Each structure stands twice: as structure tokens, then as C-alpha cells.
Amino acid sequence: MATAHFSALFVCLLSLTLIQEVQLKPETKKPVRLFTEEELQRHDGREEGQPILMAVKGVVFDVSKGKEFYGRGAPYNALVGKDSTRAVAKMSLAPEDLTSDTTGLTEEQLESLESVFEGTYKAKYPIVGYTASRILNKDGSPNDDFKPEDQPHFKIRDEF
């Protein structure tokens, strides 16, 4: 009887120890910050070991885990190292579309932009910052009142 109690106690302690060992550690997030155009350009996939960054609607994403799509020589490499909002909206890789300018986009293109922004970029890639030069209003115009502290994933203690 004592052996059965001891065995049961041993199994409970062993189980608790194993549970503690396999618990997932909380994900540590890098600070969210503002990027200048020059800083963003340095993360275009050319330099091995550097994160690959791109911005859509002024939100900077780390697309490094999609290196086969965005890395050097990859099909969508033209989109990285800059704010490619217009190109994403138009599903275009044309050099003139590799910009944050949304002037003249159709309603359909703006809806496509929102769909890809939410369904692809925000769903798959971590937000690491915002572009310093431009954040878009819903109508596509620049938001001069943009405040990083009002944005998702930003904490006032984060670095710039």
C-alpha cells in the first residue's frame, strides 16, 4: 500500500516536472520603431544575415521567413527595402508602382490592398515598425497626425 502511494506521488511529481519543462516560453518581441527610407533600404535582402523588411500602408514587416519570395533574386524582391503600398494594391512589380503613393488607385485596388494587408502581411509577418515619412489615412492620403503610440504593437518604452 505504501509503495502504491509512493508510486502515485512519484508519477505526480514527475508529471509536474515534465509539464514545467515543456511549457512554451512567452514569445519575446523586438521593439517597434520608426524607419527612415534610408534605413528601410538597407534591409532589401542583399546582405546575408540582415532582416528583410518591407512596408505596406506605412507598416514595416519583417518578411525574412518568406526569404524564398522576398530574398535576393526571389520573385518579389523588388517589393522589399521600401514602402510598396501601390505595388501591393495593383499587384504590380513595375518600378513606377514601387511607392507608398496611392493617388489615383481605384476602389477595387484599395480593397485589394486592404485584403492583402490584413490577410497576408499582418497575418504572416511580424510588425517591426512604421515608416517615418508616411502613414496612410483610409482614403490613402498622408496622416500628418500619426502617432506611433496609437498603433498596434507599440509600447511607449520601445526604441526608435
Image (spheres, rainbow, N blue to C red):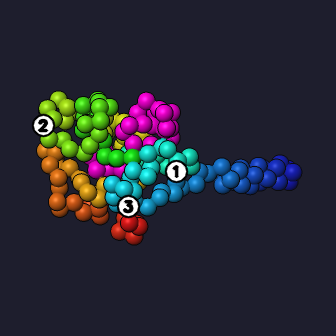
In this view, 151 is above or below 44: below
Check disc 1 and report the residue beneath it. 50
Residue lying at 32% horizontally and 50% vertically, measured from the top left:
59
Q: Quadrant of residue 107?
A: top left
Residue positioned most to the bottom: 157
Q: Position of residue 157 (x, y in %)?
A: 39, 70
Count of numbered marks? 3
- The span from disc 2 to disc 3 (Cα, nearest Å) is 30 Å
First of labels 2, 3 by sequence position: 3
Check disc 2 and report the residue beneath it. 104
Q: Given contact means CB atoms under 8 Å apart, are the residues at marks 3 and 1 in contact? A: no
Q: Within 10 angstroms of label 2, few (less than 14), some, or many (20 or more) residues?
A: few
Depth check, mark 2 against mark 3: the one in front is 2
Residue lying at 39% horizontally and 42% vertically, measured from the top left:
80
User: What segment carries the magenta color?
Assistant: 55-80
The reply, left or right, for residue 129 in relation to residue 70 is left
The reply, left or right, for residue 118 in relation to residue 45 is left
Q: Given contact means CB atoms under 8 Å apart, are the residues at marks 2 and 3 in contact? A: no
Quarter of the figure that contains the C terminus: bottom left
**Is-magenta flag for residue 148?**
no
Report helix, strand or loop for mark 1.
loop
First of labels 3, 1 by sequence position: 3
Q: Which mark is residue 33?
A: 3
Residue lying at 20% horizontally and 50% vertically, measured from the top left:
136
